[in-house]
Every structure is written in structure tokens, then in C-alpha cells.
Image: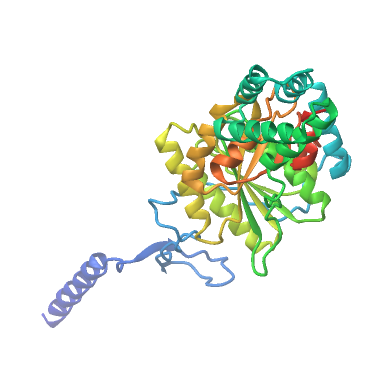
Amino acid sequence: MILIYAVIAIAVIGTVAILLVKGRKTPPGTYPTTRDANDPVRGGGGTDTLEAPPAPAEPRVAVPEEELPATDVEVADDAAGIETVPVETPAPVEGRLARLRARLIKSNNALGKGLLALLSRDKIDEDVWDEIEETLLMADLGTEPTMELVDALRDRVKVAGSQDPEHVKAMLREELIKLVDPEMDRSLAVERHADRPSIVMVVGVNGVGKTTTVGKLARVLVAEDKDVLLGAADTFRAAAAEQLATWGQRVGVPTVKSDVDGADPASVAFEAVKAGIDQEVDVVMIDTAGRLQNKVGLMDELGKVKRVIEKQAMVDEVLLVLDATTGQNGLNQAKVFSEVVNITGIVLTKLDGTAKGGIVVAIQRSLGVPVKLIGLGEGADDLAPFEAEGFVDALLN
């Protein structure tokens, strides 16, 4: 009888133990895993538990989400290993300026030829002065500068009492140089600061040659032994990032870009500046998407790009690229862009060919901002610093 009770007790105890084991749950925050008998660290068979993986780290870019949406950005470590295409050393500044003069002389510029033809007449009467005024206005000089130039020339011709063509041409040259203003500071802010690179933004509407300008300027800076990094913040135009990266390869500098179509341009710009700071380069150049000056949303986004960049470093130079052949429309573009991003300099492209030339004066007068660079064509070396006297001499042949 005692034996029967003992067997029953053992059975009950065993059943309870089995139920307790089956009812045990894995503690919260752990994941079951099977132990490998060949594991050199834990070894043995059976079951073990692993702690839950830690929460993901905070994003490296600590910028508010509404300012900087996440995007995949490719950041090059440095220029080492970049496949470069051998290119000639950029032509000296003097050579590029000489090319400008030659092209302007060959071009059919209404300003220089029209003025010289009028001022070379045997008699300069009121009808001639009216024609001179009309010629200047057609050359996009602007109303106020036109009146200043005509009044100054009339007074000088009257005081001199001479209508000798060479004498009149010399006076015209002097007055034009005054209008173009050789005293304006046309230097580029591309010197590295003590603790960060110089930051250059390049802006403008579609089709004016922004990306090409960035590439040509990078070529010039590399020739001056500066370390340059490019940021492809034009994320909307097809192949814009690849076009900029190609320019980077040609001159041996890295390009920060996103491989995601339509990526946030502010994010790319932010990463480019961060990479430039980390790599201690001399200049970071940011290429932006073409903006239509009458599209408020696009212009606001351009302002956002600048604000996001300045979370790390102030922007030293904002270059507005304008097509010189667009005349007064270019002036309207310049006004809108200056309100959004505080333009510091103008780059005039396509200044050879059919450009009228007077837009140089009109833009400078309107914005109080100098023309710093001029584009002469499609070649790699067709970018030159603007020089007032050389420009006027080219116009007047």
C-alpha cells in the first residue's frame, strides 16, 4: 500500500514539474537562439538567449527632419584613387583674356561698333546724340547708365571743341570704363580659413551653364594647387551629378553626390561641406539645380540649401551664372536670386558671339555686385576673370 502511494506521489510531482517547464516564457527583450556545439565561444548544445540588439544610433546628420530629409549620399574619402583623364594645364590668365578680346572683336557687338560709327561722323548734332542713346539702350546698358554716358560725352566733346575720331574714341573709352567700374572687388573668396574650407555656391536658371562653370573653375583652382571638393546638389536634372563627377575626374578632385533620383539637394550639400571639413580641403564648390526665378517653391528650396550648409560653415561666395545673351531678362533673374541667397558675384557665360555687352553695367548697377568671371565658349579653358579695361578695349576693338 505504501508503495502504491509512493508511485502516485512521484507521478504527481513529475507532472507538475513538466507543466512548469512548458509554461516558462522567454523574458521580454530577448531572442531565442540555438547553441552550436562547435561554437568556439559558447560551445555545447541546447538553447540560450541573446539580448535584443541595441537601438539604432542617432543619424550622423543632426539636422531637423523638416530641413533635411534623409537621403543616400555617396561621399568620397578623398581624391586618392579617382580615375582621372589627362588634360592640359589650364591656360594662363593672360592667355584667356587675350582670347576674350579676340572673340569680342570678331563678334558683331552693337555697342562698340555702333558708337564708334556715330562718333566718327564729321558733325555730331542732336540727331547723332539721339542715335547714340538708342544704341546704348539696345545694347542693354540700362536707362540710367545710358543717360550718364551720353551726358558725359556731350559735355566733354563740347569742352574739348574737337570731333577728331581718335580723340572722341579715347573719351568714349574712359567713360565706358567708369561705367564698368574698375574699382569693384572682383576677387574670388576661395582661400581656406584657419579651421574650414572656403564654401562656394553656384546658382542660376536652367541652361546657363552652371555645372560647366563649376567644372571649369575647379580646373583653374587645381592649377593653383588648391584642394577642391565638389558637391552635386543638382539632383533634379538627369545626369547632372554624373556630369559634375566627370569634371571632377578630369581634374582629379572628389565629388559628393547621391545616386537616388530626386534626392534632397540640401542633404547632398550638407554632406559635401561636412566631407570638405573632415578632409581639410581648401574649397568646397556646390552645384545647385537650375531654378526658374518665377517659381516661388524652387527659390525657397534654394534658400533652404544655403541655410542647411550654414549649419556647419558660412558660405563665402555665391556666384550667379547668367547667360549674357538674355539681356534684360538676365537682369530680372539676378534681382530675384539676390533676394533669396545674397549674391556675391556674377559669372557671365556666352559673352562672345551675339552678346550685347551692356548687361555688364546694368547688372552691376542694379545689384551692386561685380561681374567676377566670364565664359567665352565651351572649351575647358574658356573661363576668365573679368577685367574692366580689357572688356571695354575688346568692345571698342
**Residue 110 location, quadrant:** top right
Would residue 306 be visible to someone looking at this image?
Answer: yes
Q: What residue is rendered at 14% in x and 76% in y?
A: 4
Q: Nearer the viewer, residue 31 or 136?
A: 136
Q: What residue is rendered at 61% in x and 27% in y?
A: 140
Q: Residue furthest left?
A: 1
Q: What residue is rendered at 55% in x and 48% in y?
A: 268
Would residue 71 be visible to someone looking at this image?
Answer: no
Horizontal and vertical percent for residue 241? 62, 38
Q: Nearer the viewer, residue 3 or 356?
A: 356
Q: What residue is rendered at 43% in x and 32% in y?
A: 295
Name the side, left or right, on which 149 lies relative to 23. Answer: right
Horizontal and vertical percent for residue 387? 76, 43
**Residue 277 location, quadrant:** bottom right
Q: How is the image coloured?
A: rainbow
What is the total number of numbered labels drawn onto the structure image?
0
Pick the quarter of the image with the C terminus. Answer: top right
Name the side, left or right, on which 58 lies relative to 351. Answer: left
**Residue 327 location, quadrant:** top right
Horizontal and vertical percent for residue 93? 84, 44
Q: Is residue 355 above or below residue 149?
A: above
Horizontal and vertical percent for residue 68? 44, 51
Pick the quarter of the image with the N terminus. Answer: bottom left
Q: Residue furthest bottom?
A: 2
Name the side, left or right, on which 139 lies relative to 301. Answer: right
Q: Is residue 289 above or below residue 222?
A: above
Q: Nearer the viewer, residue 32 or 69?
A: 69
